[in-house]
Image (tube, grey):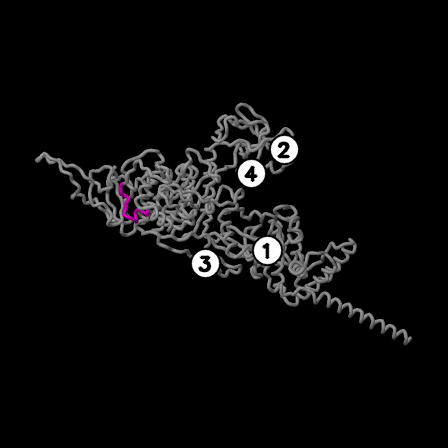
Amino acid sequence: MKRLRWLLVLGVLALGVGAGAVAFTVYDQYWRSLPPISNLLAYDPPVATRVYADDGQLSGEFFFEKRYLTAIDKIPTVVRDAFVAAEDSEFYEHPGIDVRGILRAFMANVQAGTVVQGGSTITQQVVKQLLLTPERSYRRKLREIMLSVKLERELTKDEILYLYLNQIYLGDGNYGVGAAARAYFGKSTAELDLAEAALLAGLPKAPSRYSPTRNPEGALTRQRYVLRRMLEEGFVTTGAYRGAIRSGLNVLAKVRSRAKVGSYYTEYVRRYLVDRFGERATYYKGFRVHTGMNLKMQTYAEAAVRRGIEQLDLDLGYLGPISHLTPHEIDERLEAQTDRDDLLNMEEGIAYDALVTDVTDKTITVTLGPHASEVDVTSLKWHEEVEKSDRQFTVGDVVETTPVIDENGATLLALTQTPQVEAALIAIDAPSGHVRAMVGGYDFARSQFNRATQAYRQPGSAFKPLVYAAALDNGYTPASVLLDAPIQFVDNDEIWRPQNYSRQFYGPTTLRRALEKSRNVVTVRVVQDLGVAPVADYVSRFGFKRKIGRNLSVGLGTSEVTLLELTSAYSVLANAGRKVEPMFITRIEDSAGNLLDEYKGNNTEIMPAQTAYLITSMLEGVVQNGTGRNVKSLNRPTAGKTGTTNDQRDAWFMGYTPDVLAGVWVGYDDQRTLGASGTGGKVAAPIWLDFMKQATADTSVSDFVMPNGILCVHVDPQTGLRARHDNVDAYLECFRRGTEPRTFTPIWKYDPVLGTETLVTDETADPVNVRDGEPLAPKIGRHIFQ
């Protein structure tokens, strides 16, 4: 008996030693090798960098994982309760692991013969996502359990829940409740209600299967399950439960549907951030980037560019089918389209490739899935580049079409094409330098090349105001008269004879008239008189990155510039001679809102305020009487200038009101001609006008402010001298004080007593002939006696 008792004691000791040895082994192999919890104490997940417009609205974001870190005190109780009820109802009671849950999962795995259930608590899910690999094994499970117990000892429940609710994947590319609330409901986490919270809490189990955007029925079922669990756990009342059930997925109707506005602008910001902070930080650190973008103006700009390009594309003509199919390929195409559900409800304004299935003398039949339409092509305008022999359709042609809904609700197919011509637009607030809108092309999805900032093109006559400013600062006045007559120069043994666009010459011409009518010969004479080098040096002040050409054609805009550079140069004219560097970004903060960078912009005087005002008044004349007449219908004080390069490869319109400055460029990327009508006034000005009508719609009409030191007198447009009171062609011209003409246009006066004629060059009785410059001065450049 004693011997048996000793054997039992020895057995128990042996088991104890064995258990201790096992425990020591586990401690040595697992506990000691566990990842440090400090990794979680310094939680720093990838956070989306957000870009904001000038009014604080979100306009873009960059991310590896779309996540907005949300402090636990900003997450309402209803959201926390929903996730706890759905994922871990014992969360506030257990020490990190739920023993019953583990046993339940263990039995299920034994029965299945493999790991099919995890039985994980919220704490375990945090450990699994942030500290361990995703493998499914009992060894990893043991490490997960041990880490969970360790985590519960070092963090509070709220701290653990904070990690979970910011880390969890909630479908459609959204990580954490902050991003999901924005994506699904268009609101912050703090604004979520019960139905919305339950919808989100149902997603972690299977984000794709229960996605409200991909599987609404599954999402609704899961939402109701979460609501029922919340009711069972006592988190909500019966009344609140029923109300949320009635809401169902209607909460999704609150999502703000927003097209991607400002893609070119946002991409410009992204490139700057990558250069400034590096790519990883840009996508990882959650910067808050505040910009000068005005979302309304940006939307107006994109619409104006798109409408302008499409209208120009219609005017240029149809380029023909995009491809042709063999009879076998036709059969395959038609058969493949029978199963395409997306063709049942096509979106208007979108281009779809359709098949020409019948051709007659006057019509073609285009077929796309269940839709077939007869299109009249008798009046179709073909592009001049298309050979006459190719201006026809055959069965098997693939053409671009767009759906049109008729008055009966039926879907018809209309012929369209994706334009090849491009355009760009930039709008700047001149006093601050803030870039309010930027469009770099017809479609960012098609081409990310930004024609507003990356394309160097010749500006043509849009460059002339800068040269004329140099003239005004070197002895010229708006009334200076130059001879518009044939002139020639020898350059490298070649003779150059500058020509006006009209191929005509107009004789003595004032500087104002030369700018209004964009006279090339007069501009070349100005450059010749001032000197090529001084003119090139003067216009270089405006901040062009490439060297300005040093030749007589510099005044005709032969040096290549970007639209951003030229618009910035015009901002000097609009801002009383002062240049403020264009600013896309106003300030950058870290993810916690701490200021990293703030941008004020350098304010530099480029020319006297009087010079800027005189050029502005001359550019008003361009709009009222010259090549910019197409924007006259803006019906407010407007200064502007057209630009067209050789063979109509580039078309420009640069212009501003007292409130808004904008520039537009139109052309082909491969520098093809825009055709005979492809001038700045005909293709760029309409886009500018379309944008400006919307951009200035809510602003009051005001005049350009006249600075001190300006004097206005009536002048004779033929001579540039003071006009007499009976001169019906006289107009009011402005001058820098002291440069106004002192003599009058000479006339011969007959003395009946002596019977002789005398040349008179003065006029003593004309008290209204001189006016000091003041804000209420008469409009400049109009024929006031007519």
Give SS at disc 4: loop
Q: Local crowd at mark 2 within 10 Å, few (<14), some, or many (≥20)?
A: some
Front in this rendered view, residue 551 or 213 = 551
Mark 3 closeness class: few <14, some 14–19, many ≥20 residues within 10 Å: few
Q: Nearer the viewer, residue 80 or 399?
A: 399
In the rendered image, residue 480 lying in the magenta stretch gets the answer: yes
The residue lying toward the viewer, choosing from 81 and 591, is 591
Q: Quadrant of the N terminus?
A: bottom right
Task: Give coordinates of residue 262: x percent, y percent.
Answer: 49, 47
Q: Position of residue 53 (x, y in %)?
A: 47, 52
Residue 658 on image: x %, y %: 36, 48
Q: Which mark is residue 598?
A: 3
Which of labels 3 and 4 is toward the front?
3
**Distance Cα–Cα, label 3 vs label 4:** 43 Å
Residue linked to disc 2 = 333
Q: Which mark is residue 177?
A: 1
User: Mostly what secondary structure, the magenta segment?
Assistant: loop
Task: Tell me the residue that label 4 is attached to.
Answer: 347
Q: Is residue 583 left or right of residue 538?
A: right
* Residue 64 % position (x, y): 58, 53
Q: Earlier in the sequence, mark 3 or mark 1?
A: 1
